[in-house]
Image (cartoon, helix red, strand yellow):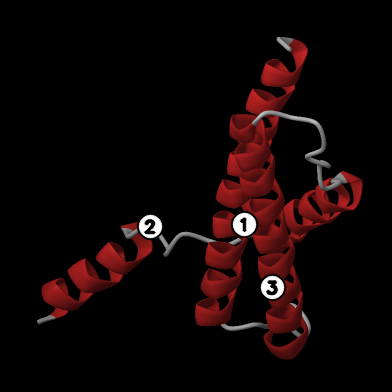
Amino acid sequence: SAVGRVRHEVAEVIAPPAELIDLRQLQRQEGEIAQWLAAQREIPAVNLNADLRNMISLHNSELQNVQDQFRQLRGFKNEYLRGASADRAVLEQYQNRLSRIMQKKARVESIYQTIRQQLANQ
């Protein structure tokens, strides 16, 4: 019916669009991670107690993991994200990969803070 058709058209207008993925924002986030990674250094574990050495070893391996994931992200981006017309599935995967890297980055920073506090207390 005509009323049904109008209702359907109105519903389409009112229905919120699928959440937009802002490619520029994701690329800014990627840039922040790149800068952060460039500033990171592995921590030498010399002349320290076993607990600290273990924590530093964990920090260094988690940092390595972030670096590896970031390299993979760049490879993925170079292969699939050419131009702004990437399809939604590709953008979602890019977003998910960035999000996982950001979580790992937070973990590395948290471990680093703990190490700094323990070093300060020695």
Q: Are the residues flagged by discs 1 and 3 in contact, CB closer than 8 Å?
A: yes
Q: Nearer the viewer, mark 3 or mark 2?
A: 3
Q: Secondary structure at mark 2?
A: loop
Q: Is residue 62 left or right of residue 8?
A: right
Is 8 positioned to the left or the right of 84 in the image?
left
Q: Do the CB atoms of the residues marked 2 and 1 lie less than 8 Å apart? A: no
Image location (x, y in percent) of residue 82 = 77, 85
Looking at marks 2 and 1 on the same chain, the residue that comes earlier in the sequence is marked by: 2
Marks 2 and 1: which is nearer the front?
Answer: 1
Residue visible at 66% across and 56% down in the picture: 61
Q: Secondary structure at mark 1?
A: helix
Find disc 1 in the rendering and name its residue. 101
Residue at mark 2: 16
Q: Quadrant of the C terminus?
A: top right
Q: Position of residue 103 (x, y in %)?
A: 56, 48
- Identify the secondary structure beneath mark 3: helix
3 or 2: tag closer to the N-terminus: 2
Determine which residue is flagged by label 3: 73
The 10 Å Cα crowd at callout 2, few under 14, some 14 to 19, many 20 or more, is few
